Image (spheres, rainbow, N blue to C red):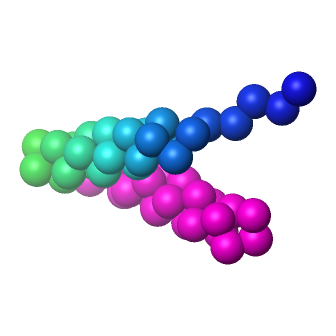
Amino acid sequence: MKQTMTDLQKDIVVGVLFLTGLYSFISGAFIVSAVVFAASAIISNVQQSARLHG
């Protein structure tokens, strides 16, 4: 049985990653911020791509 995240769970993950990246950017941890923003963008794009091909 394949377990997948629901849309709400994916939205929460993207939101948390975005807020973490924003906090890291403000506090000066630019490398961490860049990695977190990239992860947020990738997860968001994968989610949208799955909806289009779903």
Which quarter of the rendering shows the C terminus? bottom right
Vertically, is 12 above or below 14? above
Q: Considering depth in this image, is 45 or 53 the residue closer to the camera?
A: 53
Query: Residue 3 at what x, y percent from top left?
Result: 75, 30
Query: Residue 30 at what x, y percent from top left?
Result: 26, 53
Question: Is 20 in the magenta?
Answer: no
Vertically, is 41 above or below 31? below
Question: Is 48 in the magenta?
Answer: yes
Q: Residue furthest top?
A: 1
- Could you tell me if residue 4 is visible in this image? yes
Which quarter of the rendering shows the N terminus? top right
The residue at the point 32 percent across, 39 percent down is: 16
Vertically, is 52 above or below 2? below
How many marks are shown on the rendered structure? 0
The residue at the point 49 percent across, 52 percent down is: 39
Is residue 3 rendered to the left or right of residue 15? right
Q: Residue furthest bottom?
A: 52
The residue at the point 61 percent across, 37 percent down is: 5
Magenta stretch bounds: 28-54
- Could you tell me if residue 31 is visible in this image? no
Q: Considering depth in this image, is 30 or 2 the residue closer to the camera?
A: 2
Give the quadrant of residue 4: top right
The residue at the point 69 percent across, 62 percent down is: 50
Query: Residue 33 at what x, y percent from top left?
Result: 31, 50
Is residue 35 rendered to the left or right of residue 16? right
Q: Residue furthest left?
A: 26
Query: Residue 9 at what x, y percent from top left?
Result: 48, 37
Q: Considering the whole magenta stretch, tell me its main secondary structure.
A: helix
Q: Considering depth in this image, is 38 or 6 the residue closer to the camera?
A: 6
